[in-house]
Image (tube, helix red, strand yellow):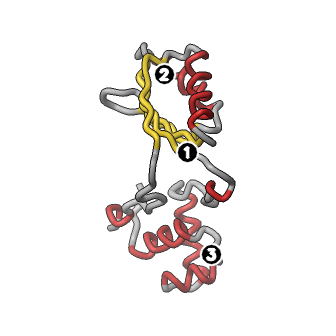
Amino acid sequence: MIKLDDRDIAILRILATDGRITKAALAEKVGLTPTPCWDRLKKLEKAGLIDGYGARFNLRKLGPWVTVFVVVELADHTAASFRTFEARIEAHDDITHCWALGGGYDYLMQVAARDVESYQMTMDDLLEARIGIARYFTYIVTKQIKGGGLPPLHLFAD
């Protein structure tokens, strides 16, 4: 495990909201000169704390779309069943996230679709593939209240 101090946390917070910031601007914002700031950033990357850099998109600018959460229960609870399901999920770009759950259900998926009909086509494909889905429950997002939040980095500070 890597130990984080206040400056490491500041670097991570800034990068989470502005991944395109210059090295000089980042150093200035965290109160360091560029070289020590760059060294800290490289340390965080080398430790695997930073998975990568990317852009956030406003899909509404492209047209209508819907976010759907789906809770899935598998018929069988063998390692092979889980592998089969997970392999099929990887093949669907519209399934943007999928988490294995402990408890009553096996998976929680997030689906981004143009509309409800497109979402249902994805589910029909999964059902027709016979990958062991016993049942699923669909939850359509009607409004996003909070999103893109930062993780609670302060919990990991020295």
Residue at the spot of label 2: 82
Q: Is residue 84 left or right of residue 107?
A: right
- How would you rate the neighbour count of disc 3 (Cα within 10 Å): few for under 14, some for 14-19, many for 20 or more? few
Report the amino acid beneath label 3. Answer: Ile
Residue at the spot of label 3: 21
Residue at the spot of label 1: 66
Quadrant where the N terminus sits is: bottom left
Gap between marks 1 and 2 measured at Cα: 27 Å
Answer with mark 1 or mark 2, whichever residue precedes in sequence: 1
Q: Position of residue 29 (x, y in %)?
A: 52, 83
Q: Residue 126 falls in which quadrant of the image? A: top right
Foreground of the two, 10 or 71: 71
Gap between marks 2 and 3 measured at Cα: 41 Å
Q: Position of residue 23 (x, y in %)?
A: 63, 78
Q: Is residue 23 above or below residue 19?
A: below
Report the amino acid beneath label 1. Answer: Val
Q: Is residue 156 above or below residue 90?
A: below
Answer with mark 1 or mark 3, whichever residue precedes in sequence: 3
Residue shown at 53% from the left, 54% from the top: 48
Gap between marks 1 and 3 measured at Cα: 31 Å
Q: Residue 89 falls in which quadrant of the image? A: top right
Residue shown at 65% from the left, 77% from the top: 22
Foreground of the two, 144 or 18: 144
Q: Is residue 122 above or below residue 115?
A: above
Residue shown at 43% from the left, 20% from the top: 135
Answer with mark 2 or mark 3, whichever residue precedes in sequence: 3
Label of residue 16 in the image: none
